[in-house]
Amino acid sequence: MKIAMLTNNYRPFVGGVPISVERQAQELVKRGHEVTVFAPMYGDTGEEREKVLRTDGVAPERVVRYHTQKHKMANGMVYPAVFPTEVTEVFAEENFDVIHVHHPMFAGPLGVRLGKKYGIPVVFTCHTRYEDYLHYIPALRVHEHSPACKRRAVRWIQEKVVPGYIKWFADQCDLVLSPSAGMRQVLRGYGMKSVCTVFPTGLEESFFRRNDLRAAEIRREYGRGKKHLLVTVSRLEREKNYGFLLRGIADVRRRMGDDFHVLIVGDGSRKAELKVKASLLGIQDMVTFAGNVPNEEVKDYLSAADLFLFASTSETQGIVLAEAFAAGTPVVAVRAVGTDDIIENGVNGFLTEEEEETWADRVAEALSDERRLKEMGRAALASAENYRASTLAIYEEMLYNQCIGAKKAEFKGAAGLPERMPQRKEERGYGAEEDRREHTAMVIH
């Protein structure tokens, strides 16, 4: 099977979507499929990594880079070109069996247009609660001094415009994949009619291989001689709710003293601000901002900890929660879409309301009973078995085949069209200018 994946961000950018796309692509390659990831240019994209065999001897996914706009978002994400010719030229020369888009903007509409042009089924994974990310658009940022009319306008966009657009885009696709059952309910709430199934991001086998020696080194380095080491991993951005997490840590200290240390892994535009907040809360000596670490080393940081802390309410799944479970580390998290689906309250972690006192109570409760903490760690490890990427790749392969079969049946039954669907540009009579007009119209819509 020849698979095209279109994404607005990819390595070297660090984030949940790039990780999800990379893992899916590489697991499908292991199963013998040919996967091309169409991803934006970042300048130094580490192309040398993309041209060599991985350590397991399997060729990595093929990556085709397309041009981006000059401006970037505050968090380092790029804006893809409205009409990336690097993508359309490959489609004009090659025959793909299925298109998998990972965003409803930019790369997404292009994928839908290419699917319609060449008669290829389009699969869409809705990775993100986009209404929670409007602050990355400068014109839509609100603060305490923003006029009331602007606040109302942004709220209307969050509650009406974004859900309406996601509903429209999802209904253009042959299949929608939701990272969690909770997110599927959100999409249905938008009014989406497309076929939708739950498909979480999987964990590659390396996450299940413990390196106890390295974990012990990390614990010695960052534990500061304290009894407990706690860890959290994510980008340091507004939507990750770090203000709540730091206030919660201060509450934990009031409950059980300072015999613990918190390691924050990740980087982002709010790092300096969060360091100041930690100082104002009097916990600057209890928190270490470690910055980014290579993705393949994250599991060792998770294994080193007694407990994983999580406060984000904007996730659709929270890949890092499954990663923590694979390390045998239970989680204390704020109840939200995505987290509800993976955490069994009181079994492999705790779920709380978005209240610092309640959240801190559960952290203190988990740390105060070592026997129960170990039991929760074993339950977390068992939960992680549901997220093996190798198993999920088999399911994804089946879903692709179903979409391909349905599309072929659709073409066979339509006006006597042949079973083989036209692929190349010359077979359909499309020209480059027509391509550009159609795609631009879809982006504007």
Image (spheres, rainbow, N blue to C red):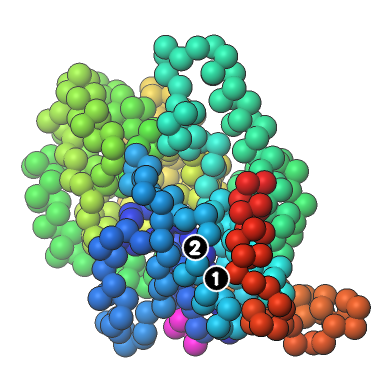
Give residue 84's mark. 2
Identify which residue is drawn at 36% across, 84% down: 59
Q: Alpha-carbon neighbours of circle 2 within 10 Å: few (<14), some, or many (≥20)?
A: some
Identify which residue is drawn at 77% across, 52% down: 193
As drawn, which residue projects farthest toward the right?
415
Q: Main secondary structure of the magenta part?
A: helix
In screen coordinates, is 267 left or right of 143?
A: left
The type of residue carrying mark 2 is Pro
Q: Is residue 30 magenta?
A: yes
Residue 10 appears anywhere in the view = yes
Residue 368 position in % (x across, y down):
29, 36
Q: Nearer the viewer, residue 36 or 241?
A: 36
Identify which residue is drawn at 28% across, 60% down: 43
The N terminus sits in image quarter: bottom right
386 in relation to 339, above or below: below
In screen coordinates, is 390 left or right of 300?
A: right
Task: Kindly indicate whether the residue at mark 1 contacts the one at mark 2 (C-beta within 8 angstroms).
Answer: yes
- How far apart marks 2 and 1 lie (CA) works out to 7 Å
422 in relation to 194, above or below: below
Q: Alpha-carbon neighbours of circle 1 within 10 Å: few (<14), some, or many (≥20)?
A: some
Give the residues drawn in magenta, as a range: 28-32
Q: Nearer the viewer, residue 388 or 379?
A: 388
Residue 10 position in % (x across, y down):
39, 61
Residue 258 picture quarter: top left
Q: Is residue 362 magenta?
A: no
Give residue 88's mark. 1
Residue 379 position in % (x across, y down):
43, 56
In screen coordinates, is 210 left or right of 330?
A: left
Q: Nearer the viewer, residue 137 or 281?
A: 137
Q: Secondary structure at mark 1?
A: helix
